[in-house]
Every structure is written in structure tokens, then in C-alpha cells.
Amino acid sequence: MWYVIVGQDNPGSLEQRKASRPDHLRRLEILRDQARLLIAGPFPAVDADDPGPAGFTGSLIIAEFADLDAARAWAAEDPYLRTGVYASVDVRPFRKVLP
């Protein structure tokens, strides 16, 4: 089943985000290579592709896991959470309808 993972950034965490990004992306690339990643990306803090020093307010990941516990366990190991980028993470089941 698909699961939505939404991480909310701590204010002022842009430098931690930049430092942790390679490890964060490596985990997402594994999901992608296993055909388990539907979409992933950050929420810019301002209306721009590159928000510059404004940074980001969080991230969205939609990926496939065996169950909710597996999705939560995967999210709990995210480098952004472990390094203090994320203040909180919400994991919910998701049913894709369109497209």
C-alpha cells in the first residue's frame, strides 16, 4: 500500500537540511530503484523553485510499504529527523486514485 510521509521542518534548519541531504536522497533512491517511490520533494518556504535563504518548511514522500508500521519505521530513520531538520513527521495510508 502507498503511504504519505510529511515532515515539518524546524525553523532555521536549512544548514542541517543541506548537510543531511545526500543521506536523505540515498534512502529515497533505494525506494525509487525498487519501484516503491511515487513522489518526493520539499515544500519551499516562498513561492520559488529555489527559495534561497528562506529554505523549506518540510517535505512530502509518497512510497509503498508493507504496512503502516513499516512506513513509520522507515520514516523514523530519515536523516532529516535524526539530525533535527524535521520537528515532526506524519505517516498516513494513501490510496492513489488519479492519474
Image (cartoon, rainbow, N blue to C red):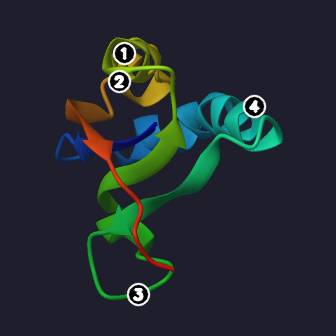
Q: For residue 30, which numbered disc appears in the image? A: 4
Q: Position of residue 54 (x, y in %)?
A: 30, 69
Q: Residue at x 17, y 47 (%)?
A: 11
Q: Residues within 10 Å of mark 1 (few under 14, many from 20)?
A: some
Q: Position of residue 6 (x, y in %)?
A: 28, 45
The answer to whether 23 is drawn above or below residue 73 in the figure is below
Where residue 77 sits, quadrant-wise, is top left
Q: Residue at x 75, y 31 (%)?
A: 30
Q: Earlier in the sequence, mark 1 or mark 4?
A: 4
Query: Outermost residue toward the bottom?
Result: 47
Three-letter residue code for mark 3: Ala
Distance from label 1 to label 4 (Cα)? 16 Å
Q: Earlier in the sequence, mark 3 or mark 2?
A: 3
Q: Residue at x 43, y 35 (%)?
A: 16
Q: Position of residue 21 (x, y in %)?
A: 59, 39
Query: Mark 1 — residue?
Result: 76
The answer to whether 54 is drawn above or below residue 90 in the figure is below
Q: Earlier in the sequence, mark 2 or mark 4?
A: 4
Distance from label 4 to label 3 (Cα)? 28 Å
Nearest the camera: 96 or 69?
Answer: 96
Query: Mark 3 — residue?
Result: 48
Disc 2 to disc 1: CB gap under 8 Å: yes
Distance from label 2 to label 1 (Cα)? 7 Å
Query: Mark 2 — residue?
Result: 81
Q: Secondary structure at mark 2?
A: helix
Q: Position of residue 56 (x, y in %)?
A: 33, 60
Q: Secondary structure at mark 1?
A: helix
Where residue 97 sits, quadrant-wise, is bottom left
